[in-house]
Amino acid sequence: MIAKYAGIAPKGDLIVLLKLAEKLHKRSFLHVNSTREGGGVAEILQRMIPILQSLGVDARWEVIEGDPTFYEITKKIHNALQGNPETITREMWEHHFEVNKANAERINLGADAVLIHDPQPGPLVEFRTGGTWIWRCHIDISNPSKQVSKALGRYADKYDGMIFSVAKFAQALPIDKFIIPPSIDPLSEKNRELTGEEINEAVERLNIPGDRPIILQVSRFDRFKDPVGVIRAYRMVKKYNDCVLVLAGSPATDDPEGAAVLEEVKEFAAGDKDVHILLLPPFSDRDINALQRVADVVLQKSLKEGFGLTVAEAMWKGKPVIGGFVGGIPLQIVHGVNGFLVNSVEGTAFRIRQLLNHRELAARMGQKAREYVRTNFLITRQVRDYLAVWYALENKGKSVFVL
Ligand code: UDP
């Protein structure tokens, strides 16, 4: 399987990856998160587990289960870590812990390395029996609620290491910390090359008009993704450039706020027939791929963003992305080189018009965008980094780091 990435992923990444996989051959590697579909974490795990298995690592993916109250609490925790004022009561923390306790009884947590994704399953560490435990934070904690990060800190201390996507998210903790940005799989249905026919079929079925430029944002319906700000920017552009706006999203099972945000967005769009709000079913990967390829301008106007896989996805398709100057987006967009970073609705509208009115500039930036993703954000690099962290933690203090 890994041979398929030769000629696509950087050769150095593949060589180190194969060496590490040899060292960790037949060892067990468990990943735990809170949803099998929707959002970036599930997106990566769906692709990464088979790659790890094909490398001879005994990889497994488990999903914790909870009642609706649990997901309401974990969404509040998520929002508070991303800087929103939220009150999380002692009862809520207890419920968070109890649901994890029940999951620890249900899930086999025995593995040589256990990688826990995000705060939802964080307390599972209380039930660790052995192996190397690593907590992976995917969200934007540049300005977290002190109360919530302190409350989670008591779990963090029990891990062997923590992984953040962006250096400025790293917290002062007495455990080893690593910076590993997420990645996309160039061979997945979401990112593979599509034929013209495949693109046309999808775009026609989704009723997207082909006679005017298309502005696209693909995101869960979440206020941190600022869908209303996107509509505002589109309205400013529309006065000068006739265009259509596509907002594509799908529900995540661990996000109870999605339906309410979708309603807000629909209301704000106020029946504008050139605003296409698409509620796609889970695993609409080829449709998203087609939309990203057919779009003239791709936005990710987030107000907070752990990384923003949608940015790398569109860049890989040769699009210069206009993204919010937050979280992991500036890691991907080099402003003015392979895309634009924005801080406001007005700035977004200005950059949309710049790209629509200067097609050669957009094409040049798009080429650079693809190359930037190829060098930095392909899944082979991320698998390499995860194995390296596991190997490093397991061999801490020994001078074995010779590949
Ligand atoms: N996504 C999808 N369908 C949708 C909306 C999003 O498949 O309707 C995918 C998107 O292509 C990306 C992931 O979900 O791969 C979202 O990851 P990102 O890091 O952008 O944001 P998150 O949802 O994790 O905050």
Image (spheres, rainbow, N blue to C red):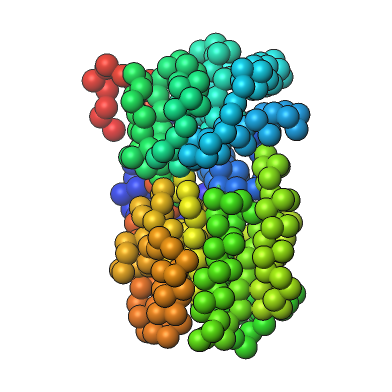
Q: How far across and how far down the image is residue 53, in percent?
A: 55, 37
Q: Which image quadrant for residue 202?
A: bottom right
Q: Residue at x 40, y 24 (%)?
A: 161
Residue at x-position 55% and y-position 69%:
232
Residue 246 visible from this viewpoint: yes
Q: Answer left or right for 103 relative to 374.
A: right
Whether residue 384 sits left or right of residue 56 in the image: it is left
Q: Is residue 289 visible?
A: no
Is the residue 271 above or below the residue 222 in the image? below
Residue 89 in the figure: left or right of residue 168: right
Could you say where residue 397 lies in the image, as x and y percent from the top left? 27, 16
Q: Residue at x 67, y 39 (%)?
A: 254
Identify the image quadrant of the C terminus. top left
Please tell me in which quadrant of the rendered image residue 78 appears: top right
Residue at the (58%, 13%) spot, across then down: 127
Residue 365, percent across and down? 36, 73
Residue 289 rendering spot, x and y as whole percentages? 59, 65
Viewer-proximal residue, 293 or 113? 293
Q: Nearer the viewer, residue 228 or 196?
A: 228
Work out whether 259 lies above or below 201: above
Q: Nearer the viewer, residue 386 or 146?
A: 146
Q: Is residue 202 left or right of residue 390?
A: right
Q: How many marks?
A: 0
